[in-house]
Image (cartoon, grey):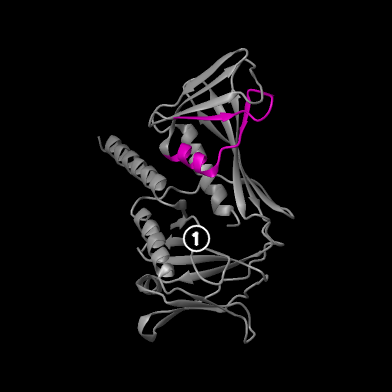
Amino acid sequence: MHFFMKRWILLAASVLLAAHLAAQPLRTCYRSGDISHISTEYEALPCAGIPAARLRLERAGFPDGSALYVLYLKLEQETKLTAPKGVKLTAHLPGGKFVRLEQMGQDVALRGTLENGLYLNRFKYPVSEEDMALLRSGVGSVEIVTGWGPDDVITLPFPDNAFSELVERLSAAVDLAAKFPAPALEGGLAGYADNAHTVMITAEARVARGDRYLYNIILSYLYYKNTDDEDVDLAFMIGMKDTHTIPQDTPIRFTLRDGSVMEFPQTRDDDNFVYLYPTLEELRRMASVGITGLSIDTESGLIEDSFPGYSDFSAVLAAQLQLLLSASPL
């Protein structure tokens, strides 16, 4: 009785976590060793004098219940900047108070200009729980030191409290997710290639089981340096006795646990092998909501399978996606 009760509690927690991940602007949520890592996606930070600014937040939770945050800031500017380790960000608070954060290290990725002609400058700061509470309370302006010279300073004013409002929203998302048990980071990487214009990361193949067939699944991640965009590709081999040629543009249909259907075109001609280009949002939905069925119409017959409960297929997608995003340059 105790064994089945434990399994029910773990399943309920997984369902609640999946629902939360689908509802919140989260990028990663996993446990590595005894530390849980939860991060948001970048969100736009309105500020005067900068063509574009974005902010995201990561929370590292420790076994004693304490946490350390990491604030990631991206600025698109006309000049390329590489802030050295140790320079400071100063956030000015009401009443003359301030918070100082220290740059963690240089952004060493090779980048030219973006397609819009601007440079992407990135900054990364650890934030204690005490300082995070102050950042949420109200920030009138931020000074970012970008070098050791007297003029190496960027000042960003926030008269409408946009900085604190965004930090409040992102920190609330990661703090809420921290109330759920984070899944352990699983698997390994099959490849990591940092090229002139892209970074490509490939997860090791993992096997998922359906009612009829086995599936050898591989997720691949691509980051584009000249646009600061990313893609994730889904490939899987269907283990079956018969050979089915799946022509390019053949519809590949996944039925999810909520009854919805997601359809993607096959991107190449191949036997028993499927290669798809879902968006990151679509892949995250497949992993979090869960896949219950798969169907492929081929010239030689229908390939159809089902996955009871929270299927192995969805679990493999979720695990590989977290692995790839944890290793991504963002």
In the figure, residue 159 lies in which quadrant? bottom left
Report the residue marked by disc 1.
Answer: 44
Q: Secondary structure at mark 1?
A: strand
Residue at left 61%, top 51%?
229
The single residue placed furthest to the left in the displayed view is 1
Q: Along the line of sight, which residue is nearer the eye, 212 or 127?
A: 127
Residue at left 39%, top 28%?
259
In the figure, residue 144 lies in which quadrant? bottom right
The single residue placed furthest to the right in the displayed view is 196
Q: Along the line of sight, which residue is nearer the eye, 30 or 268?
A: 268
Residue at left 47%, top 33%?
312
Q: Quadrant of the N terminus?
A: top left
Give the residues drawn in magenta, as a range.
Answer: 261-288
In the figure, residue 251 lies in which quadrant? top right
Crowd around label 1: few <14 · some 14–19 · many ≥20 (10 Å): few
Q: Quadrant of the C terminus?
A: bottom right
Q: Where in the figure is residue 62, as x and y percent of width and height?
A: 40, 62
- Amino acid carrying label 1: it is Ala
